[in-house]
């Protein structure tokens, strides 16, 4: 199951600052001070080897140190403020005004809330739909699974739509599709209408699962980009939990209203936030690019250096041939695709286990298990968001994948003991502990971090193709594991979870050897470092 590493690929991105120097000097030499230029010419960091070195640095090279946020004492000051002798904004001390970034993030994560609501809807609605529409259990299984089919189609088109229509228009389109999907489910009289509505909802979530984290990563300052991008996963968990808990109180048709609310809020809220400045720069809308970037950084913040860096990087990309699917197999691109996939390839699907596992192992009802998981996931994901820009992406992935290994291993032992008739009093506690450890570990790292890395690591000309591919693989993996889970459990319940724990162990090694640290770097610095490594 492990995706092979690209040949002769460095374990992590190199520390040499040569590529950023060449890239930026070509476009911004006239506008940057000599002090700014010197920051890109620091000696490469020494490699640390041996047992005492951190895991990710043994036999590996790190990304270059993050560039300072200011080039001189007046960095970030507007000309008027400088003339008046006012204290300037300093990059790491005050990132201008963040209210527009926070507002835009709050609006677009309604798409993540919609994603979670769509995923969580099928569990509490099952009894009502089966009773009212007269579906068999197998037909309802199709209803639950076709969401992934629609999401695969959405993932295939998401990148192209986001590049052609823009990030905001793509989210508007997805919200409209989602509204039609929910209304189709609400007015359904037979299985065909239910399936059609579910496919539309799947398409909506497939598009939003790509464009929401990409938009957040393109508008956020580098110092808080990871934390804001993690809000995507936080609101997915919130949407799932809301559907589970509210669904226990409402009928399946009334629960549709819960799913409609995020779509409507997203549709309306998009009128009050700017478009992604990097997308505007990429299509040559210069005036709108500067206006958008200024709104996201605050009216008193000097955006000249950041704007020059973005435009210089995009101009260098425009000199390259138009991106094609076969370009994915170039070394820097196949590496980026590879490191974006750890949770999609190695982590078990997390939405169907509670209903099946709690009654079988711990004796708790499925609804109680779902509620416990909802209570755990939201605060743990919030903790991951707070740690994202402090501890870094790699550290969270290593801790999280180790935790998922432990959780699956404990759950596997609980099934093994139950089958052998051993420690019967210990089995319920062991199962409960294993399942909750798995969900807690998944929520802090393996859930949110790969989406953050996906939104950061691809160049802007490859985001449409590579990002769409990564999102597609995510949904294919979800569908495949969901479909095969019952067969695996029928084969050997203990063996199933030992298999999943082995996959999590592979993830630990995968992250340690391949995944780079992107904390505290602009998207342009990340791309320059990737190019230098190849």
Image (cartoon, helix red, strand yellow):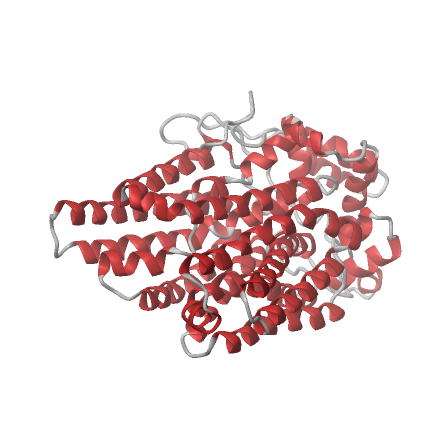
Q: Position of residue 45 (x, y in %)?
A: 56, 30
Which residue sits furthest top? 8
User: Based on the displayed image, in which of its 4 quarters is residue 79 positioned?
Assistant: bottom right
Report the quarter where the N terminus lies: top left
Q: Residue at x 66, y 46 (%)?
A: 156
Report the quarter where the C terminus lies: top right
Specify whether residue 97 is in view. Answer: no
In this rendered view, identify the residue nearer to me: 93 or 426: 426
40 left or right, relative to 401 = right
Q: Residue at x 40, y 47 (%)?
A: 400
Specify whether residue 302 is in view. Answer: yes
Q: Where is residue 430 in the image (x, y as percent from the top left)?
A: 21, 53
502 left or right, relative to 81 = left
In this rendered view, identify the residue nearer to me: 85 or 243: 243
Q: Position of residue 508 (x, y in %)?
A: 40, 37
In this rendered view, identify the residue nearer to me: 371 or 529: 371
475 left or right, relative to 70 = left
């Amino acid at each position: 199951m492990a995706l092979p590493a690209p040949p002769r690929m460095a374990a992590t991105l190199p520390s040499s600052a040569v590529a950023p120097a060449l890239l930026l000097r070509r476009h911004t030499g006239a506008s940057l001070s000599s002090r700014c230029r010197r920051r890109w010419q620091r000696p490469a960091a020494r490699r640390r080897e041996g047992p005492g070195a951190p895991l990710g640095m043994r036999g590996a090279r790190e990304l270059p140190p993050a560039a300072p946020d200011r080039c001189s004492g007046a960095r970030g000051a507007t000309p008027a403020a400088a003339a008046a002798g006012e204290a300037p904004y300093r990059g790491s001390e005050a990132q201008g005004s963040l209210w527009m970034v926070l507002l835009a993030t709050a609006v677009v994560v309604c798409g993540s809330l919609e994603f979670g609501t769509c995923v969580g809807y099928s569990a509490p609605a099952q009894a009502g739909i089966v009773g009212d529409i007269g579906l068999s259990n197998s037909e309802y299984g199709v209803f639950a699974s076709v969401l992934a089919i629609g999401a695969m189609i959405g993932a295939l088109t998401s990148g192209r739509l986001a590049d052609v229509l823009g990030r905001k228009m793509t989210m508007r389109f997805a919200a409209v599709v989602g509204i039609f999907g929910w209304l189709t489910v609400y007015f359904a009289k037979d299985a065909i209408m239910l399936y059609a509505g579910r496919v539309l909802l799947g398409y909506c979530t497939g598009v939003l699962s790509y464009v929401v984290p990409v938009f957040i990563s393109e508008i956020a300052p580098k110092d808080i980009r990871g934390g804001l991008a993690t809000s995507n996963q936080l609101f997915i968990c919130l949407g799932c939990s809301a559907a589970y808990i509210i669904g226990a109180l409402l009928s399946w048709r009334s629960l549709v209203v819960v799913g409609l609310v995020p779509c409507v809020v997203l549709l309306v809220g998009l009128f009050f936030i700017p478009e992604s400045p990097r997308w505007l720069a990429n299509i040559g809308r210069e005036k709108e690019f500067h206006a958008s970037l200024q709104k996201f950084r605050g009216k008193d913040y000097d955006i000249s250096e950041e704007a020059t860096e973005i435009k210089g990087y995009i101009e260098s990309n425009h000199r390259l041939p138009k991106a094609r699917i076969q370009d994915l197999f170039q070394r820097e691109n196949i590496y980026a695709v590879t490191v974006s996939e750890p949770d999609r390839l190695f982590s078990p699907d997390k939405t169907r286990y509670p209903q099946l596992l709690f009654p079988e192992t711990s004796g708790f009802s499925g609804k109680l298990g779902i509620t416990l998981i909802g209570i755990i996931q939201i605060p743990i994901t919030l903790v991951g968001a707070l740690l994202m820009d402090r501890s870094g992406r790699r550290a969270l992935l290593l801790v999280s994948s180790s935790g998922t290994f432990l959780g699956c291993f404990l759950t596997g032992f609980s099934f093994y003991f139950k089958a052998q008739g051993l420690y019967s009093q210990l089995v319920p506690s062991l199962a409960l502990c294993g399942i909750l450890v798995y969900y807690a570990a998944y929520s802090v790292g393996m859930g949110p971090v790969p989406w953050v890395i996906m939104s950061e690591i691809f160049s802007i000309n490859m985001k449409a193709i590579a990002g769409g591919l990564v999102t597609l693989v995510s949904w294919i993996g979800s569908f495949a594991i969901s479909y095969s889970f019952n067969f695996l459990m029928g084969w050997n319940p203990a063996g199933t979870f030992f298999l999943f724990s082995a996959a999590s162990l592979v993830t630990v090694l995968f992250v340690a050897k391949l995944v780079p640290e992107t904390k505290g770097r602009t998207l342009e610095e990340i791309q320059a470092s990737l190019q230098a490594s190849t």
